[in-house]
Image: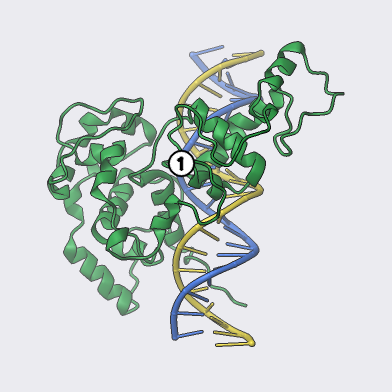
Chain colours: A green, B blue, C yellow
Amino acid sequence: MGRQPCCDKLGVKKGPWTAEEDKKLINFILTNGQCCWRAVPKLAGLRRCGKSCRLRWTNYLRPDLKRGLLNEAEEQLVIDLHARLGNRWSKIAARLPGRTDNEIKNHWNTHIKKKLLKMGIDPVTHEPLHKETDQDPQQSHAAQKSPQSDSNHDDQTQLPGADVVPVNLDENSYSPTDQNSCSDESNLPDANLYENDPLISCLFQDDNDPPQADVSWELFPSPEENFDSLFATSWEENCPWLLDCQDFGVHDFDYGCFNDMEVNNALTSLETGNDDQ
DNA sequence: AAGATCCACAACCGCAGGACC
DNA sequence: GGGTCCTGCGGTTGTGGATCT
């Protein structure tokens, strides 16, 4: 049926995002909220397809994201939810605020799956593996302690230490992804969210104490601070961890490169169909 | 020290479904 | 009702770093 590709492949950049691109995207979302991802690249001055922008935002730049490995409680919850929901990662992620479906999926594939296998549990069915796979005593012991062995979880599973939403499999229950619906005021990132986000906080904060690598991800900027002035501060001093994350072109990370005029120009070119990517 | 292999994670791809015209 | 657009989802791939030989 001649469905259009999500982006024209020509001139669209792929691969890892640079700091410059991140900055443009963050800045755009902060200014305009999440709206019409297809238009975002043009409006934000990015050579990316909208899909890529959306993924980058939801999986990495979103202010309410936690970072770092899932803690034990979260892991247990993922296992429990997976037993009921299967590979519906977005549903699972909805029960773990600050975690993305991609993150959980990756963690499942790289850690939990192996862990379960080691414990003698089939990661697909969550049933004990066949007896012919001779478990050594340690493994069978581990299997006995597995979350699946106590089968009477109810739908309000809440593990100690887990910063998670109570499990209620009612489809209408809370989902963090609900904030993704298109642009109204409520869609603009809540300033309070940034109090829990290290990346944004690094970008915004004054040069105070650097965030801890471990991440309680607690944050700092006073709400009344203006994003512009915050962006202008020297974040790289405060965020050595960020420099480790990607090969960022940090020195290009100049907030001044994006402004209203640029947005207007992009809007104009979008309206007129002028695409000079 | 260098090459090979493994591992973890970010990013991409293709499809499905809902909204809109 | 059908076509198109847009977004979200789940599976898969690519890449860089870590570890092993």
- To which quarter of the image does residue A11 belong? bottom left
* B16 left or right of A161 in image: right
Residue drawn at point x = 39 percent, y = 50 percent: A57
Whether A69 is drawn above or below B18: the answer is above
On the image, the x and y values in percent for residue A103 come to 50, 40
* A145 left or right of A207 in image: right
* Chain of the residue that carries numbered disc 1 in the rendered image: A
Closest to the observer: A121 or A44?
A121
On the image, the x and y values in percent for residue A241 come to 33, 29
**Residue that numbered label 1 is attached to:** A165
Mark 1 residue element: loop
Q: How many C-alpha atoms fall within 10 Å of the one at disc 1: few (<14), some, or many (≥20)?
A: some
Q: How many marks?
A: 1
Residue drawn at point x = 71 percent, y = 15 percent: A141
Q: Amino acid at mark 1?
A: Val
Residue drawn at point x = 46 percent, y = 31 percent: A162
On the image, the x and y values in percent for residue A77 come to 55, 35
